[in-house]
Image (cartoon, helix red, strand yellow):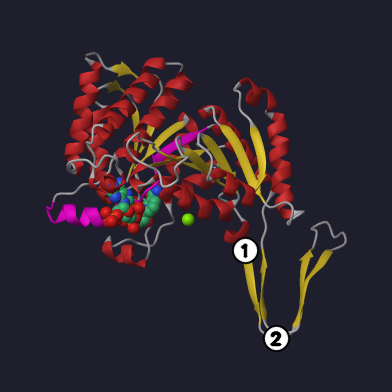
Amino acid sequence: MAKIKVKTPVVEMDGDEMTRIIWAMIKDKLILPHLDIDLKYYDLGVEYRDRTDDRVTVDAANAIKQYGVGVKCATITPDAERVTEYRLKRAWPSPNGQIRGILDGTVFRKPIVAKNITPAVRSWKKPITVGRHAYGDLYKSMELVADRPGRADLVFSPDDGSAELRATIKEFNGPGVIMGMHNTDKSIHSFARSCIKYAISEKIDLWFACKDTISKKYHARFKDIFNEEVLKHKDRLDQSGINYRFLLIDDAVAQIMKHEGGILWAMRNYDGDVFSDMIAAGFGSLGMMTSVLVSPDGHYEYEAAHGTVRRHYYQHLKGEKTSTNSVASIFAWTGALKKRGELDGTPEVTRFGERLEEAVLGCIEDGVVTKDLVPLMTPAPKGYETTEAFIDKVAGRLTAVAN
Ligand code: NAP
Ligand code: MG
């Protein structure tokens, strides 16, 4: 069979530990045999990041800006223990945080749904994608302990020397705690635009939820900016048949439990942190959760939501057999290829991405799975595959379908 030509390059970012092992297998067995593709390769493995003083991460992010589509393997975010383990010069910042900062993007997490994997919530039939605003609020807040009676004020001093704005938070009679947090219009606008871009690209309805009944200025600002952006993009949303709904966060939580899915649920930073884990747990395994970073100007970076699966890697290093789920990593590739095909106007590339996904889901639905999925399946499968055997079976199925 002739290989399918991919018109524009895709940025490939390699990573660490067990996912690096899986990455090479996916590339060799599932991608390169079928595609004639120019991969712009960046090694984001922690050793090479260290060697380049993390320059490689910045270069990779800029390459995504240039080519528009990237696919990334999971990477180590070093802490003190990792600095010793890998003899690093320092604890480099999270590559994902770095890339997100450069692209000014929003991360969307989407579970992969298979017929014989039962979500914890009965009504969930289609993926529920979570869009978490990843800037500000609790995560960039200042806190104080008030250790004695006193008054806490909120003060804003304009740069132009005009009058200060002031509000009393609390007159303390005894000890207590205080927090100040912020967000910026710019970041909220970017977030709203990325959510709209993603909803249009996936053709799914968009929910945004917060608590503007209680927070009439702070949360209300988010609601207003979302409304503004939705109005600006009204034609595109209408053309794609996408409905936008604003909900109170507690109402959204109650409704999601009765919903069939197939929506994008956008949330503020803290809500997104909490509910993305709830949704992930409800759908099953971390090995089945994908993630895509979407920038407001339409650049896309796909990856698995899980980490480098360290425990399995140490098993692998000892020469033991592993059964690590490669599905989310494979879907990172298919997500990138489908998007590449869409942007390039090459349906055969998009179709290849879909066929690879069908091969994976076909295996799962035939009971060919890795160990993590076994307890989630009805009917229960007879056994499970090793890391490599699963990928081989997907490869076999992909080739069989192609012929
Ligand atoms: P992890 O890679 O998410 O794995 C935690 C546990 O979840 C695993 O030990 C395994 O459970 C299960 N699991 C996750 N993915 C799986 C898969 N594909 N197949 C089967 N089981 C899976 O987190 P970690 O091992 O604690 O973290 C390792 C490194 O990942 C850290 O250095 C962290 O910085 C990094 N990290 C990177 C990213 C990213 O690049 N996006 C995200 C998160 C973490 P069992 O052991 O019970 O089998
Ligand atoms: Mg969380």
Expressed as whole percent of the image width and height from the top left, the position of residue 72 reads 37, 40
Point out which mark residue 141 bears: 1
Locate residue 67 relative to residue 223 in the image: left or right.
Answer: left
Point out which mark residue 148 bears: 2
Expressed as whole percent of the image width and height from the top left, the position of residue 97 reads 48, 50
Q: Is mark 2 within 8 Å of ligand 2?
A: no
In the image, farthest residue toward the right: 163
Q: Is residue 231 above or below residue 56?
A: above
Q: Earlier in the sequence, mark 1 or mark 2?
A: 1
x 20%, y 57%: residue: 314
Is 311 covered by the magenta stretch? yes
x 42%, y 16%: residue: 346
x 58%, y 48%: residue: 254
Locate residue 205 relative to residue 180 in the image: left or right.
Answer: left
Which range of residues does the magenta coloring cover?
299-320
Residue type at mark 1? Ser
Expressed as whole percent of the image width and height from the top left, the position of residue 273 reads 52, 54
- Kindly indicate the quadrant of the structure image that contains residue 247: top right
- Kindly indicate the quadrant of the structure image that contains residue 168: bottom right
